[in-house]
Amino acid sequence: MKKSSLQDIRKHNANLILNSLMHQDAISRTDVAKITNLAPSTVSSLVGELLEDGILIEIAPLGSTGGRRRMQLGLNGNYGFFVVAEISRRNVTLHFYDMSLTRREQAVTRQGKLSGDDVFSEIVDAVRNIMEEKSSLSGRLMGVGLLFQDDIQASDFSVMYSTSLSSATISLHDALFTCFKVPVLEEFSLEHTLDDALSAVDRRDQKNAALLVFGKQVWVSVMLEGKLIPLRDGSASIITHMFLHEEKNGNPVGSGSMEASGTNLVPFILDDRGGKVFIQKACNAIRMICMLFSLDTIFFVGNVQKFLSPLKAELKKAMDDGTVPDIRMLDDIPATDKVNTIAGQVRDRALVS
């Protein structure tokens, strides 16, 4: 067998051991062998290497089984750290975690509209400050998580990245990977929001759902059989055009200001005067979505609560009773801690990469 193949097998087995420890309390070598189905000698050898590298630590002895004392194994919280950046249009919040996923540091960047270059600089400067100054974190940077909030897409934050040889516009993901040479994970708040919504209801009856988010744009995400499906713009698609109110001359009200000024979706549609317009547009949009997908529930996010009852009444008139989905506001559905979730995903990817 080739040497490279033996190395691949050892790395695979080491990853199995790390996986067994990532989501468990401290356990012994014997427990690791049972969980991974690896030979005790293999576990003992690889655990020794992981202890020597500083990734694992021995925490405390367990009860004796008649032979040598069994030692609890755990991840070394000081081996390295991770950062998760919550990215909105006006600021970035940075969360720093140690290897045990304890949040040790948090920083909010300057307020104001941020470009991709701004976000990149804020993350890089904060990480370098953590590494150069005394802080509660130690070790090296192991990975970066990017959580894009609201209706933000990764393409909104491109970076002009320069080296001694050339410069080019690249994604924030690629710029951070090039700078730090660590795994970079991208996640989107809309995906987690829809998953939170489905977690709050009975999945047996609510496997098929959509999420409509009303903000600067109108976004839709769809989940069928409990799985998010790809749409035109990725995991979510912009359907703002379906909600624009047209004047008699055919020009959409507010269409220019929506992109230029960053104001919320056509204020006229969402105020009391425009209530009828919103209900009509929402009804048409939902009918169109339901023609494409068979849905049990549609969740709304945004300042549209007051239009919910008349919208439901209008939908019952416009659609067959058997095809009208349940319309629910998402405000009262508890959300998971998305930042902690992503921190765990970043750590897991970094350790087994």
Image: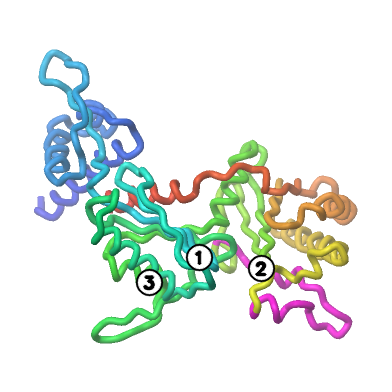
Q: Check disc 2 and report its element: helix, strand or loop.
A: loop
Q: Which mark is residue 121?
A: 3
Q: Is residue 267 visible?
A: yes
> Which label's residue is closer to the chain start, 1 or 3?
1
Q: Check disc 1 and report its element: helix, strand or loop.
A: loop
Q: Is residue 352 visible?
A: no
Q: Do the residues under discs 1 and 3 have CB atoms within 8 angstroms?
A: no
Q: Which mark is residue 91?
A: 1
**Neighbours of disc 2 within 10 Å: few (<14), some (14-19), many (20+):** many
The residue lying at 20 percent from left, 48 percent from top is 11
Q: Can you tell which of label 3 and label 2 is closer to the viewer?
A: 3
Q: Which one is in front, 304 or 243? A: 304
Is 163 colored magenta in this rendering? no
Magenta range is 235-260
Q: Amino acid at mark 2?
A: Gln
Q: In this rendering, would 210 be left or right of 133?
A: right
Q: In this rendering, would 70 be left or right of 195?
A: left
Q: Which one is in front, 61 or 47? A: 61
Whole-percent x, y for residue 53 in the image: 14, 46
Q: Amino acid at mark 1?
A: Asn
Q: Is residue 171 above or below residue 198?
A: below
Whole-percent x, y for residue 299 in the image: 69, 51
Gap between marks 3 and 2 measured at Cα: 27 Å
> Which label's residue is closer to the chain start, 2 or 1?
1
Whole-percent x, y for residue 279 in the image: 83, 60
Q: Which residue is mark 2?
A: 217
